[in-house]
């Protein structure tokens, strides 16, 4: 294979970014130090709900090393706005969602444990922390609304006076009348109550920020752990009012994982960059893990009741769903969109369901804000649909694989009753491949073999679909988004022929520096090492929307394709001029411009150089230089889909669930780098297993204290909790973007939980078990299901 | 304040520090070796693993003063001449890292694991990684990389 072919699209190219990470030369925010920097420490609320009668900072101000103490009063006096939610959801009665203020530092009320009360800035972190202990806050503790099930009751404590019954919105989607009619003619109705457990993100790099202000230029600089630095800059300038956009530079250097939690604009980085100007010195803050648990936006946390109507042949007729979604104490940057447009719109799953009606109440509680996390809405939808389908299979006696086959959507495009228009897919192909890989037919034998060993064996399927790309702009705009969701790229060809690509996407583990370079190198016929991907700095890169929702391939790379097309067009013009030929006669292949039918040819580097020497360009026709930009707005979401199948064995004595095999077969459309894509799937599955078996963010229902506030209490998946995974791919090309890509970052986190719970409930012979299916819960389920025993 | 001295990546290192300074703080803040990371405050995540006198240690669990006179090896010292250590090379080859934040700790743990246990199998690697958390990779490729490196280093 030639060098170019080895580095091209579809090849498992080893990552360009790895060298710096494996040698300890990465630059994460906390690794960066600025001259004369100070350290911030945030005094946080110990109460879930309290009125602040007074804050006395006088003693703290005298403490050694203290440079400044900032409270909500300073923020308000400075005229700064609060943090915003960039998506407006409208209730079914036509009223907009009810939004309480979200101050950067609390003014007179704290609304969750960990809420920000004051920022102490000192010469060292230890001094800042010590001084914070001297701040006297006179709290009047108030009752808190903590549990999702009771926060809408009339006597529940109120989080925001603006939102009676703690209800932010009562949203609906689908067709109620048609769904009622479908249920009226149903031969069978399957019902289930489902909990989607709260997750705490835990990117391994804690959030961090360094705020700076240059008095001479009036320019603020913020280094921050962000998935979308331009969006952060826009929010901080246009809404919070820290500085005008052109006077604020946001840099997201190496970022150690995000999973959604680093999309949002938080109080800490806002306070650091704002106060840096007040102090005239840089302010650095890095969360410790306990703060991360308390204050990173959490994920999931739904209570749902679902009903599925079937005809006598097991064909789905209608689905109706009522969900209560926890938003936490304040609306975070995208939180209103997650349990609505990223959730309700996916409730058709892979199935032809003629009528769907969903109602979602978004509710406030005195807990940390809840926002997009690793799949964002789509895991919740998939969990609900796939648990319902599995339950329907069991109640009708139809094999779980068969009931899926009977109901799969088979012709495309397919308009669902819940907005989405699926463009391409072959769901049976993925399911068949997954069943083959796990030897579905041999399961019965394996089950009886396990029973002989005293183990309970179960198998579970999850046929998932997700909507990725999070676009197009017109569509998301009509649904309430405050931003457009396109992506940008600029391709800069240097005179020597090497290339810089500035992308509005941001990489925090996804390997863009490699994948994007593969695309560019193969299109231009140059070595991978001659391509540099630049991202994460608003001073270098044009406005871009960042990375989340598995959008960077489908949207970000499409923008690069568009820019490359312009580059090629212009380079051809230059080549035509140099070779005195007509542009139409120039072909560009493998890095060479050739006049068709002749042996006249110019190398890429020669044309690049000529673009900058610009000698004798026909004036007005060709501008010097070779640099092009593009903004790409897709025509549709993309729809990755597939089938994950899981086989478990349960020890009835301990309740421990062992995943003996996990197969994932995914259709991501075109794959640029299979090695990276597989890695993305592995990580997602691990999160899915974490949600299904281990992880649970728990607040004490009375006090609102976070019970699972450290790695001692919150069960992170570790290497010995997980098996190795078996992956496969099927492919239908996505018709709505030039590369045919769909996105892969969240598939595992979306697909895995129902596969596992379907397997666990199959093994236990029970209808349902709440996630996480911990040994204690499994053991309890076994006791109440007794006398059904292992050797049955 | 007191002066402590040790050898870090083969070079003498000494500083006047507060007694409460943790080894990881000394390495990151005093020496500016920021390849060693801090991912938690309960000694659970393993992002901070370095070698102290040849053994893998979570550098957030000990005071710098306790390392007085010790030989410390951090991720920056693993490939002194620019040639990657086989474990580093295996992490790259097998895509054992995504965001890279857990990676230095993972690699330092793996080097020690391979030294201690001659016949590593998957189950042992998974058990040995109990003290290192990765949120990105699902461990699949980390395990693969460590097994491959251990084969290679036999
Ligand atoms: S920082 Fe040392 S174990 Fe987490
Ligand atoms: S690679 Fe990101 S935490 Fe391990």
Image: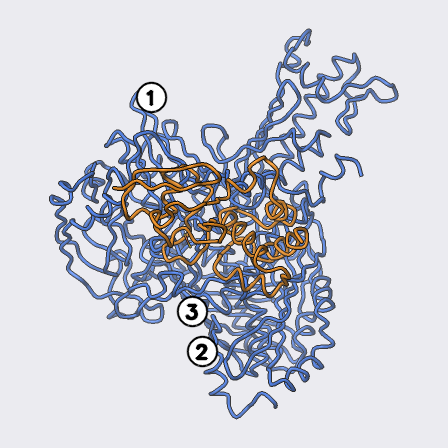
Chain colours: A blue, B orange
Instruction: Note whether A63 is above or below A498 in the view shown.
Output: below
Q: Earlier in the sequence, mark 3 or mark 2?
A: 3
Closer to us: mark 3 or mark 2? 2
Q: Quadrant of residue A113?
A: bottom left
In three-dimensional space, the C-alpha distance between marks 1 and 2, rounded to whole angstroms, equals: 61 Å
Q: Disc 3 marks which residue?
A: A303
Image quarter in which the C terminus of chain A is found: bottom right
Which of the chains bears the disc numbered 2? A
Q: Is A198 left or right of A577, judged from the image as shown? A: left
Q: Is A270 left or right of A14, judged from the image as shown? A: left
Residue drawn at the location 56% of the way across and 46% of the way down = A510
Q: Which mark is residue A776?
A: 2
In three-dimensional space, the C-alpha distance between marks 3 and 1, rounded to whole angstroms, equals: 51 Å
Q: Position of residue B154 (x, y in %)?
A: 67, 54
* Both marks 1 and 2 on one chain: yes
Q: Considering the numbered disc 2 on the image, is that residue within a helix, a strand or a loop?
A: helix
Q: Considering the numbered disc 3 on the image, is that residue within a helix, a strand or a loop?
A: strand
């Amino acid at each position: 294979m030639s060098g170019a072919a080895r580095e091209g699209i579809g090849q498992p190219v080893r990552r360009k970014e790895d060298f710096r990470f494996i040698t300890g030369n990465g630059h994460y925010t906390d690794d960066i130090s600025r001259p004369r920097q100070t350290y911030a420490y945030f005094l946080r609320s110990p109460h879930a709900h309290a009125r602040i009668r007074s804050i006395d900072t006088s003693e703290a101000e005298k403490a050694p090393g203290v440079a400044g103490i900032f409270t909500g009063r300073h923020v308000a006096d400075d005229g700064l706005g609060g943090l915003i939610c960039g998506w407006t959801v409208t209730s079914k009665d036509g009223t907009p969602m009810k939004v309480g203020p979200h101050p950067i530092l609390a003014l007179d009320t704290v609304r969750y444990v960990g809420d920000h009360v004051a920022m102490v800035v000192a010469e060292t972190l230890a001094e800042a922390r010590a001084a914070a202990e001297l701040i006297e806050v006179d709290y009047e503790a108030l009752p808190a609304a903590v549990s999702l099930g009771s926060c809408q009751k009339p006597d529940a404590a109120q989080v925001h006076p603006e939102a009676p019954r703690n209800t932010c919105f009562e949203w609906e989607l689908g067709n109620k009348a048609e769904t009622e009619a479908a249920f009226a003619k149903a031969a069978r109705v399957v019902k289930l109550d489902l909990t989607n457990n709260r997750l705490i993100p835990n990117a391994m790099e804690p959030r961090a920020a360094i705020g700076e202000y240059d008095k001479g230029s009036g320019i603020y600089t913020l280094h921050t752990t962000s998935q979308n630095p331009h969006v952060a800059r826009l929010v901080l300038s246009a809404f919070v009012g820290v500085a005008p956009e052109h006077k604020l530079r946001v840099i997201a250097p190496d970022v150690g994982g995000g999973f959604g939690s680093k999309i949002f604009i938080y109080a800490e980085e806002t306070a650091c960059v704002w106060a840096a100007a007040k102090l005239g010195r840089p302010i650095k803050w890095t969360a410790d893990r306990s703060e991360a648990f308390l204050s990173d936006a959490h994920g999931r946390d739904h209570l749902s009741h679902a009903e599925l109507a079937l005809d006598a042949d097991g064909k789905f007729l209608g689905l109706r769903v009522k969900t209560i979604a926890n938003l936490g104490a304040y609306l975070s940057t995208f939180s209103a969109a997650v349990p609505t447009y990223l959730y309700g719109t996916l409730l058709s799953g892979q199935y032809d369901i003629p009528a769907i009606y969903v109602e979602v109440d978004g509710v406030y509680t005195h807990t940390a804000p809840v926002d997009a996390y690793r799949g964002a809405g789509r895991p919740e939808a998939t969990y609900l649909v796939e648990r319902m389908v599995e339950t329907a299979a069991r109640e009708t006696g139809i094999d779980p694989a068969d009931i899926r086959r009977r109901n799969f959507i088979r012709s495309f495009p397919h308009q669902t009753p819940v907005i989405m228009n699926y463009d391409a897919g072959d769901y049976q192909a993925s399911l068949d491949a997954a069943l083959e890989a796990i030897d579905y037919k041999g399961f019965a034998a394996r089950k009886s073999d396990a029973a002989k060993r005293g183990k309970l064996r179960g198998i579970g399927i999850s046929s998932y679909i997700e909507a990725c790309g999070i676009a197009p702009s017109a569509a998301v705009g009509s649904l309430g988004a405050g931003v457009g969701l396109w992506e940008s790229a600029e391709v800069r060809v240097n005179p020597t022929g090497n290339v810089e690509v500035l992308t509005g996407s941001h990489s925090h583990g996804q390997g863009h520096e490699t994948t994007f370079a593969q695309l560019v190198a193969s299109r231009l016929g140059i070595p991978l090492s001659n391509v540099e991907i630049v991202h994460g700095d608003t001073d270098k890169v044009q406005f871009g929307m960042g990375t989340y929702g598995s959008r960077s391939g489908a949207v970000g790379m499409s923008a690069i394709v568009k820019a490359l097309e312009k580059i090629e067009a212009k380079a051809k013009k230059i080549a035509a001029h140099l070779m005195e030929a007509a542009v139409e006669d120039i072909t560009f292949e493998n890095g060479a411009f050739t006049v068709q039918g002749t042996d006249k040819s110019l190398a890429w580097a020669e044309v690049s150089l000529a673009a900058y020497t610009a000698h004798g360009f026909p004036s007005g026709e060709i501008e010097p230089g070779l640099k092009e930009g593009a903004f790409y707005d897709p025509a549709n979401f993309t729809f990755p889909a597939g089938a994950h199948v899981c086989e478990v064995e349960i020890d009835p004595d301990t309740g421990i669930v062992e995943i003996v095999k996990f197969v994932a077969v995914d259709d991501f459309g075109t794959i640029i780098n299979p090695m990276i894509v597989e890695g993305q799937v592995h990580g997602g599955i691990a999160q899915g297993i974490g949600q299904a078996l281990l992880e649970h963010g728990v607040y004490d229902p009375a006090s609102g204290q976070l019970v699972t506030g450290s790695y001692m209490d919150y069960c992170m998946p570790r290497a010995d909790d997980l098996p190795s995974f078996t992956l496969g791919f099927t492919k239908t090309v996505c018709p709505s973007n030039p590369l045919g890509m769909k996105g892969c970052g969240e598939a595992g986190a979306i697909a895995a939980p129902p596969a596992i719970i379907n397997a666990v409930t199959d093994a236990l012979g029970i209808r349902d078990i709440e996630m996480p299916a911990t040994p204690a819960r499994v053991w309890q389920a076994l006791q109440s299901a007794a006398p059904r025993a292992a050797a049955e | 304040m007191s002066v402590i001295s040790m050898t870090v990546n083969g070079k003498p290192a000494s500083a006047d520090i507060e007694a409460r300074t943790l080894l990881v703080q000394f390495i990151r803040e005093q020496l500016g070796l920021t390849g060693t990371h801090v991912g938690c405050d309960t000694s659970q995540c393993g992002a901070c693993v370095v070698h102290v006198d040849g053994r893998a240690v979570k550098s957030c669990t000990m005071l710098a003063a306790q390392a007085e006179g010790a030989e410390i090896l951090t991720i920056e010292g693993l490939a002194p001449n620019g040639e990657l250590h086989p474990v580093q090379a295996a992490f790259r080859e097998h895509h054992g890292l995504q965001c890279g934040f857990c990676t230095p700790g993972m690699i330092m743990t793996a080097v020690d694991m391979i030294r201690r246990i001659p016949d590593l199998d998957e189950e042992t690697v998974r058990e040995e990684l109990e003290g290192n958390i990765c949120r990105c990779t699902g461990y699949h490729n980390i395990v693969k990389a460590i097994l491959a490196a251990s084969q290679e280093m036999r």
